[in-house]
Amino acid sequence: MKKHGSEIAMEEDKPKITRLTDGAGSDIEVAGQWRLIWLKFRQNRVALFAGWVIFFFYGVALFCEFLAPTLPTVAQPRLTYAPPQEIGLFIEDETGQRRFQLHVNGYAMTVDPESLRRSFTSDPANIIPIGFFVRGEAYDMWGLIPMDRHLIGPLDPSDQMNLLGTDKLGRDMLTRLIYGARVSMSIGLIGVISSLIIGTVLGALSGYFGGWVDLAVQRLIEIISAMPTIPLWLGFAAAIPLTWSPLQVYFIITLIVSLLAWTSLAREVRGRFLSLRREDFVTAAKLDGSSTGRVIFRHILPSLTSHILAVTTLAIPTMIVAETALSFLGIGLKPPVVSWGVLLQDAQNIRTISSAPWLLIWPSLAVISVVLAFNFLGDGLRDAADPYDS
Amino acid sequence: MLSYIIQRLFLMIPTMIGISIISFAIIQLPPGDYLTSVLAAMADSDVNFSDEQIAKMRANYGLDEPMIMQYVKWIWGIVSRGDFGYSFEWNRPVSELIWERMGSTLSISLLSLLFVWAVSLPIGIYSAVNRHSLGDHIATFFGFLGLAIPNFILALTLMYVSFKYFGQSVGGLYSPEFAEQPMSWAKFVDLLKHVWVPVVVIGTAGTAALIRILRANLTDELNKPYVLTARAKGLPEHTAILRYPVRVALNPFVSAIGWVLPQLISGITITAIVLNLPTAGPLLLRSLIAQDMYLAGSFILLMGMLTLIGMLLSDILLALLDPRIRFH
């Protein structure tokens, strides 16, 4: 870009302008393709905000061991279906003075004499002080570094803090939600990589060669998009042998989810190839003796990276929803794996939901905000992908 | 027109074959076959067979033939006699189990399609005519929300809200007291009280998408000179908008049958499982978990065929409406 700009300037008014040195001291602002895209994207505040939301969720997924107050497997048999606690800021000490101390109220348990169901209410007399960077359950950060510090938790590790309530085994919802972020968010990311590869290669071949290759790929896409996705996912997921390890199931589920998601990407890539393959720079590359592979991967594909990025971003939420739906139905990921879908599995019937609505609310909110954020971000990227388009 | 339809039908054949191959692949995916599970059950009750007997039974069920032959037999049975195979779990032919369920799936899907059309048409027109008004922003917001909320979460939420605030349970298609009765007016009213939940749940995403498309198309049309002419010659505003621009922008409503229908059928599957509706969804899930594979495969095949027919219908309707497509 820079070189080009300086040459034109010299041709047009030779006497006035001395030759530009690269960058330094020039009056001409130069912006490359990616900078233009960024400038355009930045104007879309909603998309920018959505980007931060996604950044936040991936941050949570990355540091979940540290961020979670305890471990997702720690059960408190005496505290099943305990409601969420509120964080209080001030406490009164014996002298009646108010001082600042983060705390939650402990639970007071009442047993219904007829149904023998336990219900918990907040007990203001039982104050549990909480704080940041406290010692708690020991864990291995990323499975490597042994640690026992948690971002937030009760000062005394034997106390209970359940900011979002507990599930049927008395496990802390907040902790499980945070751990679930790691599995659910990464499934979208890993799944999108495989559908990116399939979609780009098939779309590129189909658009570049045309003819019977195009026809075959188009038929394949048509078949896949004619199938209602959920029944097909169900069909594949139900065939996973029960004996497989959670890790194997995790990878096969990502594969199943991405098998159906590559079509939109392939369509996009094909369309761009159809319009680009007659462009001058492609002809020039061919005349220079570039091989077919080089023309496709070195010359054409880089010029549509921004479009691919946008479509990819829009494909991730589909995969997150797919994993959630499959796990919810009990044929995707299964406990002890913790994902948002697995959490929602506990909220399947109306009795549970009405007595413990937090089991439905928090995982749903997490899924919906991530999906919304990805959609807004993808829309923003798509609008910015062509910076010269008004 | 006729040649267009014939051409379109021929193009459908490879897709149909593809769908049937995928369905058959799903039938074959789980390890072992029907006989393995029967023998396991027999061995549990201390009935053992000799290898010779097993081989004979295998031949009886046609399980000893190569995969391709089994596929051809299955397809031939469907095409020639409407025989979809045998449900091992229910001990009945699949065809006896499947039609009623597919019927209710189809009716709820069609009802939802009507809902999608009825809601998105006025809102889409309003949004395009009053761009960037408060109402438009509200519609856009709810549209995004509708696209983002997965069906089953929406269904669970509606269940919770109606239980908590209206004290009414919304599962199923009928209240318990009507379930066994013959059809009557009271039962019909009861049906209406229940059926709106799945219709709203599975229709929301499609509605949101269609509003966006209609808004974009109609905005393009409204900026064209002929609309200006219509206004200049003094046509009342509603005529100027409704008579031509809306009709031109309506094409996506017809093509929507093609891409909304797979969405609806996909959505009704999981929604029906949550709400416990007597459609294909719950039976499909059950058959998959029990590895009753002919039943499961037949459901998937029929659902694929249904959307294919929907696409065909939408293409034909589009060609009828729009001569540009016919003479392409």
Image (spheres, rainbow, N blue to C red):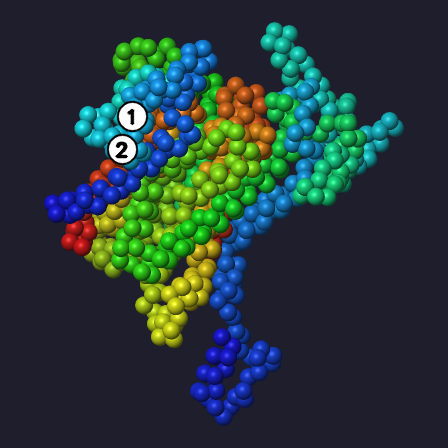
Q: Is residue B289 above or below residue B217?
A: above
Q: Is residue A353 visible?
A: yes
Q: Amino acid at mark 1?
A: Gly
From the image, tell me which residue sits under label 2.
B69
Looking at the picture, tell me which residue is in the foreground, B310 or B128: B310
The answer to whether marks 2 and 1 sit on the same chain is: yes
Q: Is residue B104 visible?
A: no
Q: Quadrant of the C terminus of chain B?
A: bottom left
Residue A230 tag number: none
Looking at the picture, tell me which residue is in the foreground, A367 or A342: A342
**Left or right: A367, with A177 as reference point:** left
Image spot of residue B61 (x, y percent)? 30, 22
Looking at the picture, tell me which residue is in the foreground, A340 or A204: A204
Measured in 3D between alpha carbons, the distance from the residue under mark 2 to the one under mark 1, in whole angstroms, is 9 Å
Image spot of residue A113 (x, y percent)? 64, 7
Query: Residue drawn at (47%, 55%), measured in percent from left and top?
Result: A309
- The subunit letter for the residue under badge 2 reads B
Image spot of residue A247 (x, y percent)? 56, 37
Q: Amino acid at mark 2?
A: Met
Quick one: label 1, few (<14), some, or many (20+) residues within 10 Å? Answer: few
Query: Residue drawn at (23%, 42%), measured in percent from left and top?
Result: B12
- The subunit letter for the residue under badge 1 reads B
Q: Earlier in the sequence, mark 2 or mark 1?
A: 1
From the image, tell me which residue sits under label 1.
B62
**Left or right: B243, with A354 as reference point:** left
Q: Is residue B105 above or below residue B217?
A: above
